[in-house]
Image: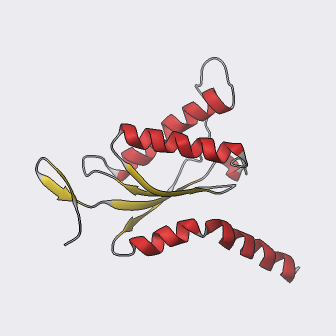
């Protein structure tokens, strides 16, 4: 049997592949901002005892492989990560002063998939995102 995690009365392994997008599909995740957003997500996950097993910030979306304790729903987890990270991005990275009401960074929805025995495949998929996107862009250039 795998090395499952445990809490007081439960043994568990709840892993999810989550994809979130910036609002209006802006290519806002370039350069130094990508690394800082990664640090923000790692810190937020640590606060809730969520493991960020794998992550990749692409120019227009973010892939994460999360191990979420069963005491949290995936909807609550993604809402927490998107909400708190948006506040920190606006406050720390965008240098916005004053109230943050009415401002958002992430698009409303998200994509989530449960990870079963395919964890290694999902990890490899996330790691290969940049190369896959470059190949796709090259293919589009060759067609036109």
Which residue occupies 41% across, 43% down?
45
Q: Residue at x 77, y 72 (%)?
A: 137
Residue 24: % across, % down:
69, 49
Q: Residue placed at 44% from the left, 39% from the top?
A: 44
> Left or right: 7 with respect to 72?
left
- Compared to 83, does 119 lie above or below? below
State whether residue 122 is above or below residue 65. Answer: below
In the figure, is residue 9 to the left or right of 129? left
* Residue 92 in sight here: yes
Q: Is residue 77 left or right of residue 11?
A: right
* Res. 133 image quadrant: bottom right
- From the viewer's perspective, is 141 left or right of 125? right
Quadrant including the N terminus: bottom left
Residue 127 drawn above or below residue 71: below
- Residue 95: x and y in percent read 69, 26
The structure residue drawn at horizontal position 12% and vertical position 47%, both measured from the top left corner, is: 8
Q: Pick the quarter of the image with the C terminus.
A: bottom right
């Amino acid at each position: 049997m795998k090395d499952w995690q445990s809490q007081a009365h439960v043994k568990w392994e709840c892993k999810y592949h989550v994809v979130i997008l910036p609002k209006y599909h802006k290519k806002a995740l370039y350069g130094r901002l990508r690394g800082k957003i990664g640090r923000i997500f790692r810190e937020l996950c640590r606060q809730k005892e969520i493991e960020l097993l794998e992550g990749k910030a692409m120019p227009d979306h973010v892939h994460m492989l999360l191990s979420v304790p069963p005491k949290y729903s995936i909807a609550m987890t993604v809402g927490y990560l998107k909400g708190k990270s948006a506040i920190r991005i606006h406050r720390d990275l965008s240098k916005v002063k004053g109230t943050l009401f009415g401002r958002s960074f992430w698009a409303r929805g998200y994509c989530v998939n449960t990870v079963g025995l395919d964890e290694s495949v999902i990890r490899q998929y996330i790691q290969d995102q940049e190369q896959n996107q470059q190949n796709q862009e090259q293919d589009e250039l060759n067609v036109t």
